[in-house]
C-alpha cells in the first residue's frame, strides 16, 4: 500500500517545494530554539538517593535522576542484557517500573496488570501478579491507545489507577488488594491513564477525557484507606475548583470570581475538559503540589468562546487541603489541543543574580517556561522547537501571543500549524542532571493541517470537532532528543530521530542519559556532548520511561519497558489505515511508516555491566 | 447542519424515554427482533449452515442513502472514534478486516447492540432508517458498494486525502544527525 502512494508522495514533495518559494514571509515568522547553552553543575539541594525507584519520577522534584555512577561514559558500551519479562499485553507501555525492597513492580497498559518480580533470584522470577479486571468497554473511551503511566509505592502498598476509573492499592508483599475506590465513570467518557502520585500520606490521581467533553478533576485519597480527602475540579464555580481566600494568581487574566464559569458560554464548563492526566510535582518545604490541566473541549475553538478557565494551565495547591494557591494559563482559549499537563521540574536557579525557587516546564505549546513556583510569575518562556502558532509570551500580561494567521476558523483549512497537537513535547517526561545542570528532552518535531468541524456533545462519545493531519516538521524528522541549559535558556545539543521520541528520559551521575525510540532502540548518550555510547534493539518500539536502581548484589541496573503504542503508536496497536490521514486524531499520518519498523508486544528489558 | 446536529442531541437525550423507542419501532418492524439472528461464526456444527436471516436491508444502498449515512456518521460521533474510516479508538472501517462481519445485518447489529471492546450501543438512540443509511455508508468505505454510489471522499474533508510526510514549506532533506545513521560504539 505504501508503494501505491509513492507517486503522489513525490508530487506532494514537489508541490511543497514550489509553495515554499512564495511563502517566505510566513516561514521567517517561525520561532526556533536558541543554541549555545552551557553546562554548569546545579548548586541546589538534592533529594537523598537510596538506589530504589518508589514513585514515577523517582523524586518529588521530577528530576528522574539517579546518583548511581557505576555505569559511566567509559563502560556504558559494555552494557548487557540481565533479564527480560513479557508483560502479556499488546498496547503501548508508558510506565516507569518501580523498585522497592528488592522487588520490581510493572504496571501495564490495559488490562492494567501489576506484576512483582523478585530481584534477589536469578532471572527475577515473578513473585505474584495482580489483575484488576477492568471492564473492556473502557477501551472505547480512551482517546489514544490504552496506556497507563505508572504508580507509586507507599507504606507496603503499590498504588495505581485503572483505565476504567478505579484507584487501587495492592499489598506489595503478596499482591492482595488492600483497597479499591471508584473515582471515574466511563459512561461519561472518564478514564484514568496518569501515574498515581503519592504525596506524604495521600495519593493523587486525575481523570483523562479531554477528547470526550469530560470535566477535569484531581482527587486526593488517603493512601492507607482509599477514602477521598479532597477533590478539585478544573472548570466551574470557585468552590468546586477549591479556589478561596488563599488563591493569589500572578496575572490579571487569572483573577476574578468564578472564572471557571464566566470564561465559558453558559454551561459549557460542564463538558469543558481541563483534565489531569500528566505529572504532579511536590515541594515539601512549601507544602505545595503542582499539576497541569488538559485541553478544553471540544478542540474546535469556535464552539467555546472565552479563555476557558482553568484548562491548559497549571495549579499550585496546598498538599493537605487541595486549596488553589495560584494558577497560570499557558494557552488561554487553546486552539490547537495544547494540553498543559507535562512535567514540572522544581529547581532553585540563579536568575538575574538571585537564587529563585522555580519550576521548569517544557510545555506542549513549544516553550520552556521558567516560573517562580512561589507566585506563578513567568520569568521566561523560550522556544525549544519549531513554533508557528504563536509569536511569544508577553511577560507583562503573561499571555501567549497567538499568530492570527493560524487560528482555526470555520470553513478554512489551516496549514503548517507548528507544533502539531502533541506539541513540541507531549507527556513523556524529561530528566534533569544536577551534574551537568542540563535538562534532557525527548520530544517531537511535528506540524499539522487543521480544519474545524462542528460537533455535538453525546455523553460517552468523542467531543472533538476537528479534522487534523499531522506530519514531521522542518527537516522531515518526527522527533528530537536534546539537552537544554535552563539558566541561559539555550539548547546545548540535539539528535534527530525519524519518529517522535515518545519515551521518557533518565539522567545518571555516571553522566549517561538514556531514552528509547519508537522503532525500538534503547540508547545511552554522554550527558555532556550527547555522543552515543551504546544502543540495544528491543522487540518493539519504546515509549516507556527508563529507570535505574541498585540491585540486591549492589550493582547498578537500567530498566525499560518496550511496547509501542500511545497516541504516536496507535497506528501500530490499532492497525490503523493511513489512507485516512485523520486517523487517530491525525497522528497516524505522521507515523505512517512506523508499522514498517516495529510491531506491538510488551516486554521488560533490564541491563547491567557484566 | 446545525439543526440536524441539534436533532441528534435531542434524540440522544430522549433516548431513555420509552415512548420514543416505540415510535422508532413503529417506523420499522425490524428493531427488536433482528440482530439476535445475525450469524457471527463461520463454524456450523453438523455441517448445517444456519437458516439465512429473514431480515432485509429495508433501505436500498443508493447514493442518497450513502450520502445521508455519511452525514449521520459525523453527527452521531461515529467519526470521533473511527475518523473517516482509518480508525483510532475504534478499528478502521475502510479496510477488508471485519471482526463482527460486513453484512448489512452484522453492521446494523454492531451499531444497535454495541460490541464488547468499546463500541457503544446506539439502540434506541438512532432512528431505524438512519441506522440503515449509516450501514450503507460504512459499507461504502471499504468498497463493498459499487463505485458509482460511493461518496467522493473529498466532500467530507477539505484536508484532502493525500498522505503527506513533510512540512508544506520545507522539503524533506537527509538528516546527518539522524541517530540511526550512527554506528553503535
Image (cartoon, rainbow, N blue to C red):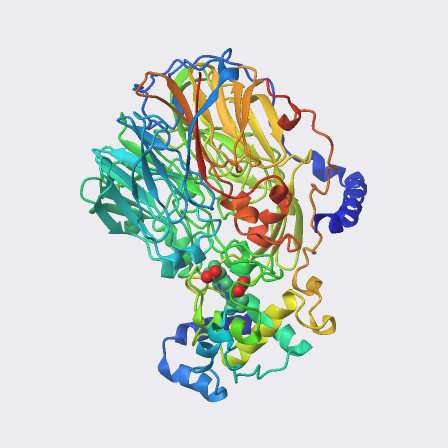
Q: Which residue is more in the foreground, A321 or A499?
A: A499
Q: Residue at x 52, y 70 (%)?
A: B5
x and y percentages locating residue B168 in the rendered image: 72, 43
Q: Which residue is more in the foreground, A535 or A460?
A: A535
x and y percentages locating residue A342 in the rendered image: 44, 37
In the picture, measured across the screen, residue A247 lies left or right of residue A370, that is left
Q: Which residue is more in the foreground, B4 or B174?
A: B174
Q: Is residue A567 above or below residue A486?
A: below
Q: Is residue A386 above or below residue B156?
A: above
Residue situated furthest left in the rendering: A225
Residue A381 visible, this angle: no
Q: Is residue B138 above or below residue A355?
A: below
What is the number of callouts on the image? 0
In the picture, measured across the screen, residue A352 lies left or right of residue B130, that is left
Q: Residue at x 18, y 40 (%)?
A: A224
Name the image quarter holding the C terminus of chain A: top left
In the picture, measured across the screen, residue B168 lies left or right of residue A58, that is right
Q: Which residue is more in the foreground, A449 or B48?
A: B48
x and y percentages locating residue A391 in the rendered image: 60, 36
Residue situated furthest top in the rendering: A74
Residue A211 visible, this angle: yes
x and y percentages locating residue A510 in the rendered image: 44, 14
Amino acid at each position: 500500500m505504501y508503494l501505491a502512494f509513492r507517486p503522489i508522495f513525490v508530487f506532494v514533495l514537489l508541490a511543497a517545494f514550489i509553495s515554499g518559494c512564495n511563502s517566505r514571509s510566513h516561514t521567517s515568522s517561525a520561532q526556533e530554539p536558541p543554541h549555545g547553552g552551557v553546562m554548569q553543575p546545579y548548586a541546589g539541594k538534592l533529594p537523598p538517593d537510596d538506589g530504589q525507584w518508589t514513585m514515577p519520577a523517582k523524586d518529588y522534584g521530577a528530576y528522574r535522576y539517579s546518583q548511581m555512577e557505576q555505569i559511566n561514559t567509559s563502560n556504558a558500551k559494555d552494557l548487557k542484557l540481565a533479564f527480560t519479562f513479557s508483560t502479556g499485553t499488546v498496547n503501548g507501555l508508558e510506565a516507569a517500573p518501580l523498585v522497592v525492597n528488592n522487588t520490581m513492580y510493572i504496571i501495564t497498559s490495559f488490562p492494567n496488570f501489576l506484576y512483582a518480580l523478585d530481584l534477589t533470584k536469578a532471572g527475577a522470577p515473578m513473585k505474584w501478579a495482580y489483575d484488576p479486571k477492568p471492564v473492556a468497554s473502557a477501551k472505547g473511551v480512551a482517546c489514544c491507545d490504552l496506556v497507563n503511566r505508572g504508580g507509586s509505592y507507599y507504606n507496603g502498598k503499590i498504588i495505581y489507577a485503572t483505565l476504567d476509573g478505579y484507584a487501587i492499592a495492592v499489598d506489595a508483599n503478596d499482591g492482595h488488594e488492600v483497597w479499591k475506590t471508584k473515582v471515574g465513570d466511563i459512561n461519561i467518557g472518564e478514564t484514568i491513564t496518569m501515574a498515581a502520585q503519592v504525596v506524604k500520606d495521600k495519593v493523587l490521581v486525575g481523570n483523562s477525557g479531554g477528547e470526550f467533553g469530560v470535566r477535569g478533576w484531581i482527587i486526593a485519597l488517603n493512601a492507607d484507606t482509599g477514602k477521598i480527602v479532597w477533590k478539585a475540579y478544573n472548570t466551574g464555580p470557585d468552590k468546586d475548583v477549591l479556589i478561596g481566600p488563599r488563591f493569589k494568581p500572578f496575572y490579571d487574566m487569572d483573577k476574578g470570581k468564578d472564572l471557571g464559569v464566566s470564561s465559558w458560554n453558559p454551561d459549557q464548563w460542564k463538558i469543558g475538559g481541563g483534565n489531569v492526566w500528566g505529572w504532579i510535582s511536590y515541594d515539601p518545604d512549601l507544602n505545595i503540589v503542582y499539576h497541569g490541566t488538559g485541553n478544553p473541549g471540544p478542540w474546535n475553538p469556535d464552539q467555546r468562546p472565552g479563555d476557558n478557565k482553568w484548562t491548559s494551565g497549571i495549579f499550585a495547591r496546598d498538599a493537605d487541603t487541595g486549596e488553589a494557591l495560584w494558577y497560570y494559563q499557558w494557552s488561554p482559549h487553546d486552539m490547537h489541543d495544547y494540553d498543559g499537563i507535562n512535567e514540572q521540574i522544581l529547581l532553585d536557579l540563579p536568575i538575574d543574580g538571585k537564587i529563585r525557587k522555580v519550576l521548569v516546564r517544557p510545555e506542549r505549546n513549544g516553550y520552556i517556561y521558567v516560573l517562580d513556583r512561589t507566585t506563578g510569575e513567568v520569568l521566561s518562556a523560550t522556544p525549544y522547537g519549531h513554533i508557528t502558532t504563536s509569536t511569544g509570551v508577553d511577560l507583562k500580561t503573561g499571555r501567549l501571543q497567538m499568530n492570527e494567521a493560524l487560528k482555526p476558523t470555520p470553513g478554512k483549512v489551516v496549514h503548517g500549524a507548528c507544533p502539531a497537537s502533541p506539541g513540541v513535547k507531549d507527556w513523556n517526561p524529561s530528566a534533569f542532571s544536577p551534574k551537568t545542570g542540563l535538562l534532557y528532552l525527548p520530544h517531537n518535531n511535528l506540524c499539522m493541517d487543521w480544519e474545524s468541524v462542528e460537533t455535538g456533545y453525546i455523553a460517552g462519545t468523542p467531543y472533538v470537532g476537528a479534522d487534523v493531519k499531522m506530519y514531521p516538521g522542518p527537516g522531515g524528522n518526527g522527533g528530537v532528543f536534546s539537552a537544554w541549559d535552563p539558566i541561559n535558556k539555550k539548547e546545548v545539543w540535539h539528535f534527530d530521530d525519524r519518529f517522535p521520541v515518545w519515551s521518557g528520559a533518565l539522567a545518571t551521575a555516571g553522566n549517561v542519559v538514556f531514552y528509547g525510540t519508537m522503532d525500538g532502540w534503547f540508547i545511552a548518550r554522554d550527558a555532556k556532548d550527547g555522543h552515543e555510547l551504546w544502543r540495544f534493539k528491543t522487540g518493539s518500539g519504546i515509549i516507556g520511561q527508563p529507570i535505574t536502581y541498585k540491585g540486591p548484589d549492589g550493582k547498578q541496573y537500567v530498566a525499560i519497558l518496550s511496547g509501542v503504542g500511545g497516541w504516536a503508536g496507535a497506528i501500530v496497536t490499532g492497525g490503523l489505515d493511513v489512507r485516512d490521514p485523520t486517523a487517530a486524531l491525525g497522528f497516524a499520518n505522521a507515523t505512517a511508516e512506523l508499522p514498517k519498523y516495529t510491531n506491538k508486544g510488551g516486554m521488560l528489558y533490564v541491563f547491567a555491566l557484566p | 447542519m446545525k439543526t440536524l446536529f441539534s436533532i441528534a442531541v435531542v434524540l440522544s437525550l430522549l433516548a431513555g424515554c420509552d415512548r420514543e423507542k416505540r415510535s422508532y419501532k413503529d417506523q420499522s418492524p425490524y428493531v427488536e427482533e433482528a440482530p439476535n439472528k445475525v450469524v457471527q461464526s463461520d463454524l456450523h456444527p453438523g455441517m448445517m449452515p444456519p437458516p439465512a436471516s429473514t431480515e432485509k436491508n429495508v433501505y436500498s444502498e443508493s447514493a442518497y442513502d450513502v450520502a445521508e449515512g455519511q452525514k449521520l456518521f459525523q453527527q452521531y460521533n461515529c467519526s470521533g472514534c473511527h475518523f473517516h474510516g482509518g480508525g483510532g479508538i475504534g478499528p478502521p472501517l475502510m479496510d477488508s478486516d471485519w471482526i463482527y462481519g460486513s453484512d448489512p445485518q452484522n453492521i446494523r447489529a454492531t451499531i444497535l447492540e454495541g460490541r464488547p471492546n468499546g463500541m457503544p450501543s446506539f439502540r434506541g438512540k438512532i432512528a431505524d432508517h438512519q441506522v440503515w443509511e449509516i450501514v450503507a455508508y460504512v459499507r461504502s468505505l471499504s468498497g463493498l458498494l459499487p463505485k458509482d454510489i460511493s461518496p467522493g471522499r473529498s466532500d467530507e474533508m477539505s484536508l484532502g486525502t493525500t498522505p503527506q510526510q513533510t512540512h508544506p514549506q520545507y522539503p524533506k532533506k537527509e538528516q546527518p544527525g539522524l541517530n540511526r545513521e550512527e554506528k553503535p560504539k
